[in-house]
């Protein structure tokens, strides 16, 4: 189920058009650069749930990626809690993308 309460049935999947340009975007923000490439997609079942399983290929992370640099400066085990902002970041970013794209 998506944000608009729409349900996509996996048995109706036809990715022939998507195969021509299989980019993966961050939270469906299509005006931003892609974050990866969809290598394959297939219908699958886990228990009693049916859906689409996909494999995404991401570019190699640079050695000087800012979150890793900061994390290394504090050492292992430093951060044992999380910020409320961390929990809301995904939905806040989605709302931001949606507000610009509308």
Image (cartoon, grey):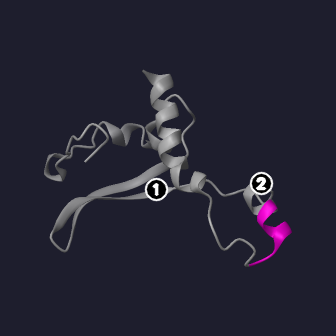
Q: Which residues are magenta?
A: 70-76
Quadrant in the picture for the C terminus = top left
List the residue tagged with mark 2: 66
Identify the residue at horizontal 64%, vertical 69% (top origin): 81
Instruction: In the displayed orientation, state which residue is furthest to the top.
Output: 102
Identify the residue at horizontal 66%, vertical 74% (top origin): 80
The picture quadrant where one finds residue 86 is: bottom right
List the residue tagged with mark 1: 56
For the residues marked 1 and 2, what is the alpha-carbon distance in whole angstroms?
A: 23 Å
Residue 3 coordinates in the image, percent (x, y): 32, 40
Question: Taking 69 as reference, is 90 above or below it?
Answer: above
The picture quadrant where one finds residue 65 is: bottom right
Q: Of 83 and 55, which appears nearest the observer?
A: 83
Task: Judge whether residue 65 can be spotted in this image.
Answer: no
User: Does the segment drawn in magenta span residue 73?
Assistant: yes
Residue 49 coordinates in the image, percent (x, y): 18, 66
Identify the residue at horizontal 59%, vertical 51% (top origin): 85
Question: Taking 102 as reference, is 28 above or below it?
Answer: below
């Amino acid at each position: 189920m998506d944000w608009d309460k729409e349900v996509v049935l996996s048995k109706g999947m036809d990715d022939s058009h998507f195969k021509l340009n299989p980019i993966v975007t961050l939270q469906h923000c299509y005006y931003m650069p892609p974050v990866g490439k969809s290598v394959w997609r297939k219908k699958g079942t886990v228990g009693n749930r049916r859906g689409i399983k996909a494999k995404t290929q991401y570019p190699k992370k640079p050695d000087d990626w800012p979150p890793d640099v900061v994390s290394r400066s504090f050492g292992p085990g430093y951060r044992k809690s999380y910020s409320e902002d961390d929990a809301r970041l995904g939905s806040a970013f989605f709302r931001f993308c949606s507000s610009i794209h509308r």
